[in-house]
Image (cartoon, helix red, strand yellow):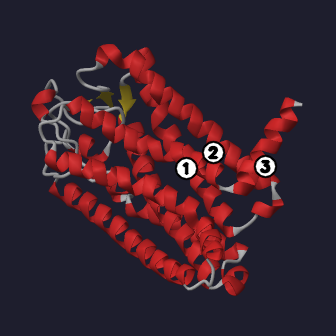
Amino acid sequence: MQETPFCLRVGHLLPYSMADSNTTDFTNPSTFILQGIPGLETAHVWISIPFCTMYAIIILGNFTILFIVKREPSLHEPMYYFLCMMAVSDLVLSTSTLPKMLSIFWFNSREIGFSACLTQMYFANGLLVVDCGILVAMALDRYVAICHPLRHSTILTNSMVAKIGLAMMLRGGIIVLPYPFLARQGPYCRTNIIPHLYCEHMAVMKLACADIRVSSYYGLFVALLVVGLDMIFITVSYTQILRAIFSLPTKDARLKTFGTCSSHLCVTLASYIPGVLSFLMHRFGQNVALHFHILIANGYLLMPPVLHPIIYGMRTKQIRERLLQLLTHKGM
């Protein structure tokens, strides 16, 4: 099977062989062993520095977004509510994977319980789908705000925003629910060593002795369904948005209106472009070393949660000004 990264990464398959792991004779192990980054074990401490830095940025940046939006009444709008949902999703996503990665780097703590592994798999994949759904919700908000500005407050009411957010969470939770159930069927009689930093879906399934085609095909179906539908919706939304922008009479009006959706557009590109690049690398880079594939896959797992608060913090005037006020006040 082919890797499908980031939003496509739901159900991806890293190109490794079972011959890369030591084999043993057992059935349905109570624990798995996360190998980390094969071939770079001696550099784990150094590799932990950027991972730790990313986790610190994710925690600090997303909590700052949540705090500013809560404290600033002018930001109590649908776009920023969706941004808060994404911040919570990113916090849970990173916390479900990064602490274990750091424990591997720092303490060589490689064991993870079977149920804990499946739980991590579920949350990692489910929250990726949630993030994709929130990007769609943000595109809807920008479409209504620009194409139907007089109806924006009546269409996207607080209750409607809450319903959309709940629908996105349910979609993410339900669509990946078969993953842990398919993985639990086993049996795992070859090895319990996972050549990865976390319990990635197909990395775990490749350890099973049984036929995993159902799981592989379902992972590909989920990736195509999520990415396909979401990208179609976002593309249609921005087609209508651009038509409305170009119909404005002056250049200043066009630039000002486009600026209201530039942050969302940057976040969307930051989420999807790395996934496409990773997809191309895994399609045409079969001879690339395994450790490089793992580093890229984990980088694309963690970079969007890092970039989301940075992009909105830098490109959103209200958030930037409020943050400067807080820093100035504390400095005084």
Mark toward the start of the polypeptide (1 vs 2): 2
Q: Residue 45 occupies which quadrant of the picture?
A: top left
Number of callouts in the render? 3
Residue 15 higher or lower than 191, as above or below: below
- Give the quadrant of the C terminus: top right
Disc 3 versus disc 2: nearer the observer: 3
Residue 299 higher or lower than 264, as above or below: above
* Label ID, residue 62: 2
* Label ID, residue 322: 3
| Mark 3 crowd level (few <14, some 14–19, many ≥20, 10 Å Cα) | some
The residue positioned 71% from the left and 49% from the top of the image is 320
Left or right of residue 258: residue 31:
left
Residue 89 x %, y %? 55, 51
Residue 108 appears anywhere in the view: no
Left or right of residue 39: residue 47:
right
* Label ID, residue 308: 1
> Looking at the picture, which amino acid does disc 1 mark?
His
> Looking at the picture, which amino acid does disc 2 mark?
Asn
> Looking at the picture, which amino acid does disc 3 mark?
Arg
Q: Residue 137 occupies which quadrant of the picture?
A: bottom right
Disc 1 versus disc 2: nearer the observer: 1
Callout 3–callout 1 Cβ contact below 8 Å: no
Q: Which of 266 and 119 is in front in this view?
A: 266
Callout 1–callout 2 Cβ contact below 8 Å: yes
Q: Residue 119 occupies which quadrant of the picture?
A: top left
Residue 141 x %, y %? 60, 73
Mark toward the start of the polypeptide (3 vs 1): 1
Residue 198 appears anywhere in the view: yes
The secondary element bearing badge 1 is classed as helix
The secondary element bearing badge 3 is classed as helix
Disc 3 to disc 1, how far (Cα)? 17 Å
